[in-house]
Image: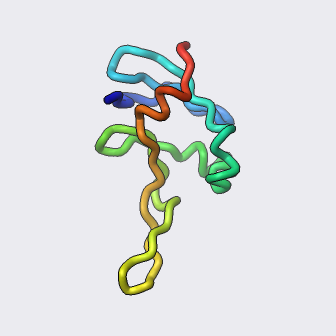
């Protein structure tokens, strides 16, 4: 399983990262924008950070429905293996 160990650069709809502490790759998020429309906002997109796994995440961008029916905001993150498959070497 891959891990994203650092973010190199965030550009409009692309993020360059280091996978597994050794491989620099660029991820194009354009194919995901229709499913995650909040990422179209460049200020939000640029707020990407690494979570504890580590993989890319956006704090409070996803929502879940709790058992009592209330809605809670949680981080939006992506499987690092999926991001690796979406990425290209730098």
Q: Is residue 12 left or right of residue 27?
A: right
**Residue at left 33%, top 20%?**
21
Name the quadrant of the N terminus: top left
Q: Is residue 10 left or right of residue 23?
A: right
**Residue at left 67%, top 47%?**
33
Relative image position of residue 6 (x, y in whole percent): 40, 29
Name the quadrant of the C terminus: top right
Q: Is residue 31 left or right of residue 80?
A: right
Relative image position of residue 28 (x, y in whole percent): 62, 31
**Residue at left 60%, top 51%?**
44
Q: Is residue 38 left or right of residue 20?
A: right
Relative image position of residue 19 (x, y in whole percent): 39, 23
Kindly tell me whether residue 26 is visible in this rendering. yes
Kindly tell me whether residue 9 is visible in this rendering. no
Relative image position of residue 54 (x, y in whole percent): 33, 38
**Residue at left 39%, top 77%?**
66
- Closest to the observer: 33 or 82? 82
Count of numbered badges drawn on the protein: 0
């Amino acid at each position: 399983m891959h891990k994203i160990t650092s973010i190199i650069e965030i550009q409009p709809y692309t993020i360059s990262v280091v996978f597994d502490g050794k491989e620099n790759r660029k991820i194009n998020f354009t194919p995901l924008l229709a499913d995650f429309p909040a990422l179209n906002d460049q200020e939000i997109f640029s707020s990407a950070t690494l979570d504890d796994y580590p993989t890319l995440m956006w704090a409070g961008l996803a929502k879940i429905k709790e058992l009592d029916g209330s809605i809670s905001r949680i981080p939006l993150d992506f499987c690092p293996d999926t991001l690796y498959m979406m990425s290209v070497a730098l």
